[in-house]
Amino acid sequence: MHVLFLSRFPPEIDGVGDYTFELVQYIKVLCKVSVLSIGKGQVDEINGIKIFRFINENKKSHYTDIVSLIKIIDPDIVHFQSATFTFKIPFLFFPLFINKPLIITSHDAPSLRQIHYFPFFNYIYKKSRKIITLSKSIAEIIKKYHFIEDSKIILMHHGADVIKFNPNVSKKDFLEKYGLDSNYFIIMSFGFIGKGKGHHVLIHAYSKVADKMPDTKLIIAGMVKEKENIMYYNYLKYLVKKYGLETRVIFTGYVPSEILPSCIASADIFVLPYLGGLHKSGPLHRALACGRAIIASNIPSFREVIKNYINGILVEPNNVKDLANSLLNLYKDEKLREKISKEARKFAEEHLDWRKIANETYKIYKNLD
């Protein structure tokens, strides 16, 4: 069996690309895998996986070229990684022209504000043999607005590398790179910087309790990917200066992948203060795998993973007081942190291991009608 993934892919920095990269490392043990991605017409290989970088997102006229290429590659199945938040229209349209059995992993679903996407997704969802969704919320939208039957939709967790990301990872590489003393208590948020991630809420909340946590540092780890978020990043820097937290808050920028496990493992409290959204969070699942004490927004996709005061703490989105109180309480309560950390790791081992996700995905391929 030969499966062709249609997706973004490293070295491009992208959450969907990271998801695909992690998944195919384990799928390739079970069947032949290749990837069709964005690029300028080159073919390369990563970890034994052939990557065809031929898709030009800004060119609407080369669908026939891509269809011809797929015929040459000749996969048995095409597995499309769908995400309205990261792909431009031309990329999203390619599955319309594919004459192969189609599987979709839906990383999100178009909202009512994106109603112009609906006709496309109506057709694609109906054309696909199976639709893998990463949250119940996404599945419900697909059923409600695109009239897809339950039997076609399969709910599956976003995976995590529970071997690479684990509670015993050394913090040394990350701490040394950013000049941090090992005695600091680290509160961390990780991911692309953008307003929807709620970094401003975290800074506001931290400013309320920083004096009561004198040995803490707030680490905002991650880069600004989209140009429209540069102004937001500058606003975050302004808030830090306004509150006099210049020596307490550190913006790391891009964190190299080779020290990412060390980065996540360095967090004593890991915070995801998202304002909303349907898609799952790769950083959340890596934090669970590392057994971190997690505080996350009480949004549908996080509620499917975080059980309040069991393997994390849920706070209301955009609620500075709620987040500040949770930060202070978790900082003071070492036993609670230890309990949450233990349960977080347990959840990751039982539900998020990429090996299990790969096996479940392979079963879908094998059982296609």
Image: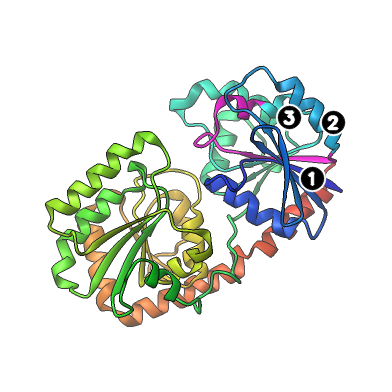
Disc 3/disc 1 C-alpha distance (Å): 17 Å
Camera-side mark, 3 or 1: 1
Q: Residue 227 in the image: state x and y as whole percent.
A: 38, 35
* Foreground residue among 189 and 153: 189
Instruction: Give the position of the C terminus as an image quadrant.
Output: top right
- The residue at 58%/69% (across/down) is 164
271 sits left or right of 300 in the view: left
Q: Amino acid at mark 1?
A: Val
- Which residue in the structure is indicated by mark 2? 71
272 lies above or below 340:
above
Residue 96 is inside the magenta segment: no
Residue 3's tag is 1
Taking the spot 29% from the left edge, 80% from the top edge, the residue there is 183
User: Where is residue 202 drawn, in percent x and y?
Assistant: 27, 55
Q: Nearer the viewer, residue 257 or 160?
A: 257
- The answer, for residue 293, to whether it is visible in the render is no
- Name the image quarter holding residue 157: bottom right
Which of disc 1 and disc 3 is earlier in sequence?
A: 1
| Viewer-closest of 209 and 301 | 209
Q: Residue at x 55, y 40 (%)?
A: 140
